Amino acid sequence: MRTRRGFIGTAAAMVAKAAQSPGASSALALGIIGTGRRGRYVGAMFGRDDRVHIAALSDLYDDQLEAAKAEIPGAASARVYRDYREMLASPAIDAVYIATPPWLHPDHFEAAVDARKHIYSEKPAAAGVEGVARVARAGSRADASKHIVFGLQRRFAPHYRTAHEIVQSGRFGPLLYMKSNWVSWGVLAQPFTPDPKLSAEDRRMKYWPHFKETSGDFIVEQDCHGMDVLNWFAGAHPLRASAKSGRGRRQYGDNSDWFHVSYEYPNGLTGLLVGTQLSQQRFSDVKEQFMGLDGTLETHLNYYRLHQGPGKLQQVDAKYDVTQDAVREFVDQIVAGRPGNTTAIACEATYTALLGRIAAETGRVVTWEEILGSGAS
């Protein structure tokens, strides 16, 4: 029987062995932990990079492993592990991509750090405050020769980097106000009936996006992207937050339907998050806005726009998934021997999202110090 215990560490047999592909010895040998939709999607980006060899896959579910072998270039001959720790113990694995649900990130990240691998982990750092603290501690003790990155892909997009430079240069005056807008189609808010044939453990694994314990609520799992951009452009994390949230449409789980969070940053700067998964089918409005004394800057996965008065619009487009930039740079830095460690950035973005969620849950202003203190154990 499949169990969470087996996935996060109980010894299990290695299912299959396969020979390495030609030329694999000179390529970066990558192991993938978690071969769900995201794992396969980003895993395929790694697989299309000639400098990477998909050497191993680890998952609980046969259907996901088979899909990964079919969808990820070069994965057909990858070794399959039920116990991800066996994979990490292999000296043949150079790097690991962690694409498991948020509540499992601390277990998998700690193990990858201790195994001294290069790490690309999906965001958020964890689903809760204590989990983020665990990830932060593991990141701080990581081997400095290993490159560690989290999937906050906006940080790696050239047009976001240019927009960040515009804010930092003061080209549109002092930064006065920031907003992260995350209005998305409410897939998880539609009528939903869990498969009655699944065990309680399998329901927890399969339906993790519906629950705070496993996802952190959508403000953590999803909106940490926007929180990271606000922190990045502000050059700081918020000092405190007040918030409201609501629930009325979701048919399953305990996540919220919407959040409205006001963050107070240093020097009187305000950051606002408006997040919901209740928009009409296929409608999406996901972007960030930065208001300066002499203009407004808008950032989006596919563009940035700088407005500075009539006839003064500067726009740069990026019509592709910028996750490619993050994956490419991860490999670039390893190949070039320029390791870095973005654990602190990912933890800060996740703490910021949790700050907003907890402020909404408690109905009061919550400070950054309270958040860090509650995860100190």
Image (spheres, rainbow, N blue to C red):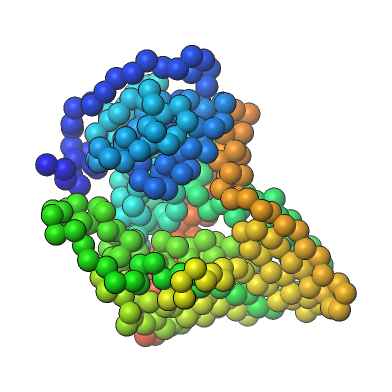
Position above or below: 312 against 376 = below
Q: How many marks?
A: 0
Position above or below: 31 against 60 = above
Tell me if 343 is positioned left or right of 210 in this view: right
Q: Quadrant of residue 210?
A: bottom left
Name the spot of residue 70 as percent of width and height, x first. 39, 33
* Residue 236 can be seen, yes or no: no
Of 130 and 310, the residue lying toward us: 310
Tell me if 284 is positioned left or right of 173 in this view: left
Q: Residue at x 18, y 32 (%)?
A: 11
Q: Quadrant of residue 69?
A: top left
The quarter of the rendered structure image containing the C terminus is bottom left
Q: Quadrant of residue 114?
A: top left
Residue at the right extreme of this rendering: 311
Position above or below: 74 against 99 = above
Name the spot of residue 335 as percent of width and height, x first. 59, 28
Name the spot of residue 249 as percent of width and height, x first. 33, 79
